[in-house]
Amino acid sequence: MQLTVTSWNINSVRLRIGMVGEFLTRYAPDILCLQETKTPDEQFPAKAFHQLGYVHQAFIGQKGYNGVAIVSKLPFSEKEAMSMCGRNDARHMTATLDKAAGAAAGIAIHNFYIPAGGDIPDPEKNDKFAHKLAFLDEIGAWGVTKKPTDRPAILLGDLNIAPYEHDVWSHKQLLDVVSHTPIETTTLEKLRSELGWTDAARTLRPEPEKLYSWWSYRAQDWEASNRGRRLDHIWLSDALKPTLRDLSFLREARGWERPSDHVPVTVTLEL
């Protein structure tokens, strides 16, 4: 069985539901995980996803910001949303595929939207950056306590950190820019390695290849300047690492009409 899972910060699912529908019709991943859905639960476009064949859904959202969702062709019976750092700010959702999912049964999918962290990389001067670091610490504590990598599992989402030198357009110029500062990159890599996750993208496409999943809206011509960052990640537990076959970034999506500033990232597993 081949399993395809996509992660995409959509920057408002209601605003871009047409775009999402076109993506799902064209590429048809088994599971789509969204971040920054920016919609309360009662306004989530569940019917539109249902009509596209994604009848299994788990989502948590807020009006105008945050929000995560998992929509799937494959059934899942377990789902859980964690409140992080004492805040119910809709930044996490887990779904576990059930027996009817065939060879994919038992795989847990952890969808995270880590805080961006503001503009000043100093937790004493910037509460948003302090929150981001605390959020990372809490993911680490969750990993130690719950041991999610003891089972077949995927952790993915907009982690808002570009950890490696070639995950950004200029390592030297971005060392003091939030998302690529040493404290962020070191913390994320330590968390990933110590908890037993494998970075799917860098396993298949190692450094020094440049990999980006985000291009700023501020760029007058994002494609020509190509000042991107790899902020969106898909990690695998050891049980799934041997099944990894492909990982792709749909770069062209950044050029679609009224796009998100992030593009879909898709992993393919052979189970």
Image (cartoon, rainbow, N blue to C red):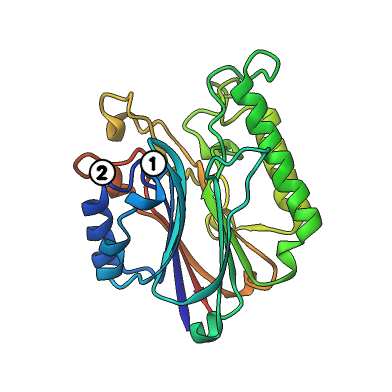
Q: What residue is shown at x 40% (from left), y 30% (from top)?
A: 227
Return the residue at label 2.
Answer: 15
Q: Nearer the viewer, residue 162 or 40?
A: 40
Q: Are marks 1 and 2 in contact (CB under 8 Å)?
A: yes
Q: Position of residue 135 (x, y in %)?
A: 66, 38
Of the image marks 1 and 2, the number of the one nearer the N terminus:
2
Distance from disc 1 to disc 2, alpha carbons, whole Å, reads 9 Å
- Kind of element beneath mark 1: loop
- Tell me the quarter of the image containing the C terminus: bottom right
Please indicate, yes or no, whether residue 107 appears anywhere in the rendered image.
yes
Left or right: 29 with respect to 26?
Answer: right
Residue 198 figure quarter: bottom right
Q: What residue is shown at x 75% (from left), y 54% (from top)?
A: 143
Q: Position of residue 68 (x, y in %)?
A: 47, 50
Circle on res. 227 = none
- Kind of element beneath mark 2: loop
Q: Position of residue 145 (x, y in %)?
A: 80, 56
The amino acid type, in three-letter code, at marker 2 is Leu
The amino acid type, in three-letter code, at marker 1 is Lys
Return the residue at label 1.
Answer: 38
Q: What residue is shown at x 36% (from left), y 46% (from top)?
A: 10
Residue 95 figure quarter: bottom right
Left or right: 256 with respect to 174?
Answer: left
> Furthest-front residue in view?
42
Question: In the displayed structure, would residue 130 be above or below residue 88?
Answer: above
